[in-house]
Amino acid sequence: MGLIRLQDEEDGSWLLGDASSPPPVAVTALSVLALMSCGEIPGRTKHGKAVERGVLYLLSRQNRRGGKHDGYIGFEADRYSRMHGHGYATLALAEVFGMLSSQDDALLTEKDVKDGLERAVRLIEYSQDKETGGWYYDPDPTGHEGSMTICMVQALRAAKNAGIQVDSKVIVRAVQYVKDSQKPDGSFRYKQGDERSSVALTAAAVATLEAAGAWKEKVLLKGQAYLIDKDLHAGLRSPRFGISSTRFPYYERLYIAQSLFFARDLGPYRRWYSKLVQELKRSRDPETATWNSKRYSRAYATAMNLLALSMPQQYLPIHQR
């Protein structure tokens, strides 16, 4: 698997190469999730040790010194992802928590992961903006924007599903933030009070509302209709499948996969997925079996594509319908 060869042999993180905006924590968390989405289990499969080493790296980046930022999983030099990285790392810890092996040679223990996950959840709860219910790039309750809020909601729901205590009021306020971000045309804003919206943000918001169980609510139905009306972002027409027409193609692709796969009508998803497979076969580097993002790294692009491709297998709890 090409993604395995991109893991650092020393610290377990994923190599970022010459990426222009390198986000180490986020990419490592996404790589761990991608491996698990392909059936790799800590301590029990061929590449299970790679998953364990990745999680150990995430735990090594966690602040455990107490204080208001206790539990934050970050990297001092990371100027780009910050709380995004923390959110994806929390999601990775939640997904791996129920998959740990009790073998003697296991690198991870359930106790270590649970402690790290609980601390990460408390940090998310602390850093929720008290006025809006959203989150921003720093681990403090001082701002909000849509993609960050969606990342935190998904992390909290995964933690709750893994048996971790989560303040239900935090989730309720966050889901309401997502709902209140919808525009009249069904798309979702970058942030409340900002008229910018996109297919990527709309797909992420729809996937989050689906996970929250808002199946009959008008806000979800309008969001789903917007995505379909946009012809899945020209995915059924464009030979480049959105690569050249969107600023965040891999992010958009992952959340389109989630939003369509969780919808009750799987027809649009099946049509979109067949085009996805064709495009990713065409665009993959045959020598390395990877894809590349000049902005965020080859590991990032490969992990995001694997997460989108592996959705039908439903190995990750967050991918289960």
Image: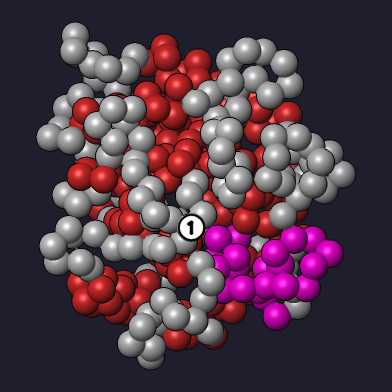
Q: Secondary structure at mark 1?
A: loop
Q: Is residue 300 left or right of residue 50?
A: right
Place of residue 80 in the rendered image (x, y in percent of width and height, measured from the top left) = 59, 49
Q: Amino acid at mark 1?
A: Ser
Q: Which residue is mark 1?
A: 20
- The residue lying at 36 percent from left, 59 percent from top is 301
Residue 281, magenta (yes or no): no
Q: Nearer the viewer, residue 123 or 76?
A: 76
Q: Is residue 14 left or right of residue 43?
A: right
- The answer to whether one can see residue 203 in this image is yes
- The residue lying at 38 percent from left, 90 percent from top is 237
Magenta span: 185-205
Residue 201, magenta (yes or no): yes
Q: Is residue 311 left or right of residue 103?
A: right
Q: Residue furthest bottom?
A: 237
- The residue lying at 53 percent from left, 84 percent from top is 230
Place of residue 305 in the rendered image (x, y in percent of width and height, measured from the top left) = 33, 60
Quarter-wise, where is residue 126 in the image?
A: top right
Place of residue 31 in the rendered image (x, y in percent of width and height, measured from the top left) = 34, 44
